[in-house]
Structure formats: structure tokens, C-alpha cells
Amino acid sequence: MNVENAPWITDQSRSLLAQRGHAWLLSGPAGLGQYALALGLVKAWLCEKSHADGACGQCGSCHAIDVRTHADLCVLMPETWMLELGWPLAEKAQADLDEKKRKPSKEIRIEAMRDAVDFSQRTSARGRGKAVLVYPAEDMNGFTANALLKTLEEPPGDVRFVLASEAAHQLLPTIRSRCLVHSMVWPGQALAMQWLGAQGLEPTQAGVALRACGGRPEAALYWARSGQDPALWAAIPLAMARGDLQTVRDWTPQQLLGTQQQLCHDLMAMSVSGAPRFFASQDLNFQVPLADLAQWSATLRDHRRTMDHPFNTGLFIEMLMAQAQSVLAKRNSLT
């Protein structure tokens, strides 16, 4: 899934490369291409033949990044993300996982940040400076964030940082203040549909995926390629109201929780004469008291905060569906 060359990403890359700064913070909701833009920036910074539009994509530096071996690039991610995106782990971390001493970390570990601090103080191997890419930046714990802060306060002369975040409000204010903040551009419907079509999605499939992901094209492409059934999306509101477990039998708890939050959002919006964002209006032909929706929304937020706790998946899904059915049982038809 090559989002790096999407038109809204290349436009932003061109703009950012024309500006000066040692640390950037790319901020915006998930699914807009923060990681792709961050990777494009570090490629251009380290490229041997970079131009106004970014990296050349052909030189030895670009190739080294593509194969994850560039000596002047340090990537900081949770180990789960590193493994998913093909970045190598530190030797000790990989040995711990191979020996099953622990599971891959879901946050950026302090050991990795200490390695990054050491990296930033070393001499550039290729002579074009060094770069540190942090994603998702909100996955730093307190110790990790403070270690990064010290480096941002007194950055070595030849290292640049790019932090990509899908929840920048969770970062330390002192980290945000030491970065140039860039808000990710939200591409329009026509541009997003055109790009999704170029990725092989049929118009109907692209339209449903884009709506299901709230207009975020990268997320829409992932949604479509993850095996989601576009024809099923319109039936989800009534399936939730019926407590139909068969409809969600293959879903993960995270997927179900996210979908219920989307449904709750749209019903709340419509209850105050707003427009739905994730579902079509004709698929929400009922109304639920706003007070009940507000309580449901708060309950779903509480569940989101405890998603990493151990639980029985089947029972958790049954509970979510039972809660949805209880709230939506109070619906009144709008037709």
C-alpha cells in the first residue's frame, strides 16, 4: 500500500521540504498518511540527489531506506509496529522475542530511545546528516518522552527529527513546543475517490470504504483490503439494534468497538440536526434519545481505555452487542 506517492502527501512533502527546522511534528487523525509523509521527509533529507519534490528514489541512500539498512536513519516505533512495517529491532530486543522471554512491546521502549540518543550523537556515516523518525509518537511512555525531550532541547547539529502522531494532544506540551507542528491535510472527496480508484477499488467499494473511515483515504484503502464487505455496512445499524452476533462473528473487539463508536457518533449528530459522517442517512432511519447516546458514548470510551487488558474475546463481544442492543432498543422510527 504505497501512500507515499499519494497527491496530498507529495504536496505536503514539497511544502515542508521548503522550510527550515530540526524537528517536525505531523499531527492528525489516523488514516491520513502521517507515516508515509514522515518517511518521505527523511528519505529526502538523506537522499544523495534530492529535489524540491522529495527524494530521487534511485540513489544508494533511498535504496538503503527501502531495504531498512540506512546507517543514518533511526526509527522509533513500538515493536509491534516495527515488525509489521519490516524495520529491524535492536539485537537484544530481537533475541528476547526469539527466546520468547517477552511479547513485542506496544509502546516505544526507553531502551530504544536511549539507543536513539546515542545514535544522534554519532557522526553521520554517509555525510548527509542523520534523521530520527518517531511513529506513533503518542506511544512514548513518560520516561521515553523525557529522554527525547532532552535531545530536542539540545539537538546535535546534523540530526533532524520527525514525529508522526495520531493523537498529538497526548504528547508532552514541552515536546510539542520544540517542534514545528504540521496539521495533516484532509483530501477532498473527489481526490480521495480518484486515488482509491487508482489503487484498484471500484467506485461503489471506494465510496463505502471512504464513508466507513470518515473520509480518510489511507484508512479506507486498508479497510477495503482487509476483507470488509461493502454491502454489509448499510445493514450494521439495524444489526446492532437487534444484537445480531452473526453479523460480527468474524470481527475483532477493536473493530466492533470502533464501529459502535462511529454509529453512536452519527446518531448523536443526527439527534441535533447534524449530518452523519460514517453511515448514510437512509441507513439511520431511527432516533435514540440523546441522553442515552451520551451515556453509551461514555461507556464505549471507558472500554477503549481498557482494550489492552486481558479478557475473554467472545464474552467481550457479547457484552458490547448487548449494550448496543439495550441502547438502540429505545429507538423511534423516523419514517
Image (cartoon, helix red, strand yellow):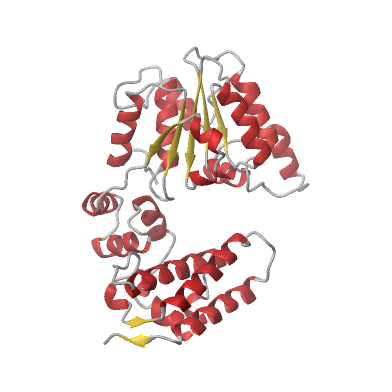
Instruction: Identify the residue at image location x=30%, y=29%.
Output: 15
Name the residue furthest left.
Answer: 190
251 up-or-down from 147: above or below:
below
Where does the image place residue 56, in percent across and percent down from the top left? Answer: 34, 24
> In the drawing, does residue 212 fall left or right of residue 302?
left
Q: Quadrant of the C terminus?
A: bottom left
Report the front residue among 12 and 103.
12
Residue 214 shows in this picture: yes
Instruction: Identify the residue at image location x=36%, y=87%.
Output: 332
Instruction: Identify the residue at image location x=59%, y=78%.
Output: 319
> In the drawing, does residue 36 fall left or right of residue 199?
right
182 up-or-down from 234: above or below:
above
Report the front residue among 170 and 127.
170
Image quarter of residue 235: bottom left
> In the drawing, does residue 164 fall left or right of residue 51?
right
Where does the image place residue 287, in percent across and percent down from the top left? Answer: 36, 81
Where does the image place residue 125, in percent across and percent down from the top left? Answer: 55, 14
> In the drawing, does residue 47 fall left or right of residue 139?
left
